Image (spheres, rainbow, N blue to C red):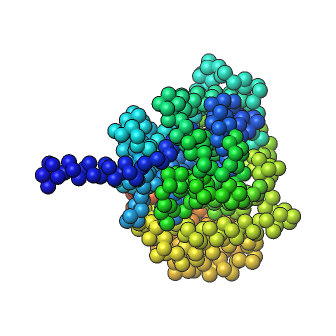
Amino acid sequence: MNWKSATLALLALLCARTLLAADRPNVVWLLSEDNSKHYLKHFDKQGAATPAIQKLAAQGITFDHAFSCSPVCSVARTTLMTGLYAPRAGTQFHRKYSIAQLPAGWRMFPYYLRQAGYYTTNNRKKDYNAVEGKGVWDESSQRASWRKRPNPDAPFFHMQSFAQSHESSLHFSTQQMNSQKTVTNSQAISVFPYHPDTPTYRYTVARYHDRMQEIDRRIGRVVADLEADGLLEETFVFYFGDHGGVLPRSKGYIYESGLHVPLVVRVPKKWRSLIDRPLGSRAAGFVSFVDFGATVLKLAGLERPNHLDGRPFLGAGVDASEVDARDEAFGHADRFDEKYEMCRSLRKGKYKYLRNFQGYYPDALQNNYRYRMLGFQEWRQLFHARKLNAAQRQFFESKPAELLFDVEADPHEVQNLAADPEFRHILTDLRARLEKRMRQLPDLSLFPESVLAEQAMANPIAFGKDHADEIAELLRVANLSVQPFADVREQLEQALESDNPWVRYWALTNCTLFGSGAAPLAPLAKRRLEDDELLVRVRAAEFLGSIKAIDPRPHLLDVLKREESGVAAAITLNAIVFLRDGPHRYEFDVSAKDIKATGNGVSRRLEYLSN
């Protein structure tokens, strides 16, 4: 092809894209990092005043029930971009040890906008756990802006993140706390009931309210730029948090404080006809991050790819009454940095069901990054000094396999209703609904992360389909822990003798959840200390050590000497930290020379264990 032919072909392509893009709305996403809805007065009366965000709401829609599917950035942002539930797509672990591939032909949703002629920009955070693929962004950088599009008439999708509210903004020192005053009056704020009411916590909350007010100012500046460019009334502006947070027991935890995010969508005059709601109204329906990409495609008048898990909640033909009838939100948490614990949640209406598959791990289990915050450090000090009340101690105690909360009566989720006979029918209904969701995904986390890293990440979706029956069986075994031990003892005995190592793995995990109640299975569990699968040995040592049936240390240290996978070694070290820091108080002498494998999780745990 000569240069004239190439030029003509390029012009033809540009013309075709211009025709495709003709008269479509612009969309802007403005994300504040690490904040749940609890820190904005527009959503919670104890929150900070955010006049710019409230102005957006007056000219648009407030979504009172918007949820991140995961309480941490890399998982949440990958979900936003892919429109896929992370445990289905292999993107559920933060930080990734291996990156997931999407199936051939599946793309992150801005790709489809670009194909239709949109100019797509991201300023600038990505943090994906999946391979991005080509053609997603025209530009992703600190300088990315709709203002740089070559054709000023082209529609655009612009995503911009604001880090002023990030967790790191609360990594201040005692000296800084004493010298840097907050604009917010620390005596006027409210401390959550599960936190100790101390000067440190009051300062931390006040400082975070200051951060939210800075976020609001920055949101206002972007909106002013759109208005100055004459684009505001052609542009849908979404403001939302990229997940919950950021005080202790929020980011990294699937309570409401970790998942329930603020969401406001400003509706432009030009495209008012696409919205079936009065401006300034509040939407009651439940929407989740899997829905956001599908919603943007709908607003742009584009077809929703069949593989997306989400459904649009705005756009032509979307019935507001149908959206408001949606009342379920699925949440998940797995590994955050070096801290492992598999949790799932389902909120339906005012009830929130949490399933702790490894509930013997306390929420307070060490995560090095979390404990940079003075609030985390002081909370733990007060626990060891026995100066906390029952609600404040929960963070440091083991959890039952199931939790149930009425989040209208108990918004901070401290009163567990799971054992209350009055709520038995709600518990069993939500349990069944969650199990159905996990089977339908299917939920890859029923396999240890090390298995997924080695076998699944080239195509996690296909791996899940190929192993759907096995995952269903693993889930069945894992769910034995929600029944009385006497009712499932025989099934656990059979599972401990299974030919499938991961059935044995979950049987032993259940034993640790049952605690001393499962002591009759100790003889069978001891046989698993020589299991062919090293992670099964870990679970056996964890269980037997937790009930003081053996000294688990030589068994766990032997695994570390043998294990070649850095991911499996990190799982083993997670168990070691639990047995060292929990009520068991086993002292471990472990260093890098004792561990065959390497990796970030290994180095983080060694950093902590060496102190």
Residue 22 x %, y %:
43, 48
| Screen quadrant of the N terminus | bottom left
- Residue at image coords 49%, 70%: 464
- Residue at image coords 65%, 33%: 55
Q: Is residue 575 above or below residue 166?
A: below
Displayed quadrant of residue 358 = bottom right
Q: Is residue 27 above or below residue 535?
A: above
Q: Which residue is more in the foreground, 258 or 594?
A: 258
Q: Which residue is more in the foreground, 279 or 362?
A: 279
The answer to whether residue 600 is left or right of residue 354 is left
- Residue at image coords 64%, 79%: 493
Residue closest to the far left: 2
* Residue 13 shows in this picture: yes
Displayed quadrant of residue 519 = bottom right
Residue 555 x %, y %:
52, 63
Q: Is residue 235 above or below residue 465?
A: above
The answer to whether residue 386 is left or right of residue 563 is right
* Residue 576 shows in this picture: no
Residue 43 x %, y %:
71, 40
- Residue at image coords 70%, 63%: 401
The answer to whether residue 32 is left or right of residue 375 is left
Residue 543 x %, y %:
62, 65
Q: Which residue is more in the foreground, 599 or 444?
A: 444
Q: Is residue 377 above or below residue 477?
A: above
Residue closest to the far right: 422
Q: Which residue is more in the foreground, 253 or 485?
A: 253
